[in-house]
Image (cartoon, grey):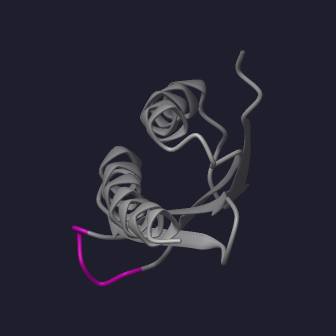
Amino acid sequence: MDNNTIIFEYHDVNASDTLESFTKEKLEAIFTRFDFVHRADVFFKTENTSSDETGKKCGIRLSAPGPRLFAEASHDTFHDAVSESINELKKQLQKRKEQVKTY
């Protein structure tokens, strides 16, 4: 049963089904592996940067017991920004899971 919520917000970016399904797929791995995560808020925005390698920004906030988890990355593509944000969240979740186990 899939009762996880994913909310997408776009700032100065056109909504994209491709991007959303890519992100959902990545988040599904988190929801599956860390069953205490029940919601993700995903923010996409573009920034004016002097570098060609940044500007497409993705922020992801996860709702889980304890303090909110948040990661953000800026790359030349939203896909890369999503991937980096997800990887960062996995590290945070792994730490949280280990902390929870010690009680």
Specify the segment rendered in magenta. Answer: 49-53
User: Residue at (50%, 31%) from the top-left corner?
Assistant: 32
Residue at the far front in the pictured view: 103
Please indicate whether residue 17 sits to the left or right of residue 47 in the image.
right
User: Residue at (46%, 62%) from the top-left corner?
Assistant: 101
Q: Is residue 58 above or below residue 48?
A: above
Instruction: Label the magenta part by its dominant secondary structure.
Output: loop
Q: Is residue 75 above or below residue 36?
A: below
Q: Quadrant of the N terminus?
A: top right
Please indicate whether residue 61 sits to the left or right of residue 26 in the image.
right
Res. 55 image quadrant: bottom left
Q: Nearer the viewer, residue 2 or 61?
A: 2
All told, the count of numbered labels is 0
Q: Is 59 contained in the magenta span?
A: no
Residue 97 % position (x, y): 45, 60
Residue 59 % position (x, y): 54, 65
User: Residue at (40%, 53%) from the top-left corner?
Assistant: 86
Q: Is 50 contained in the magenta span?
A: yes
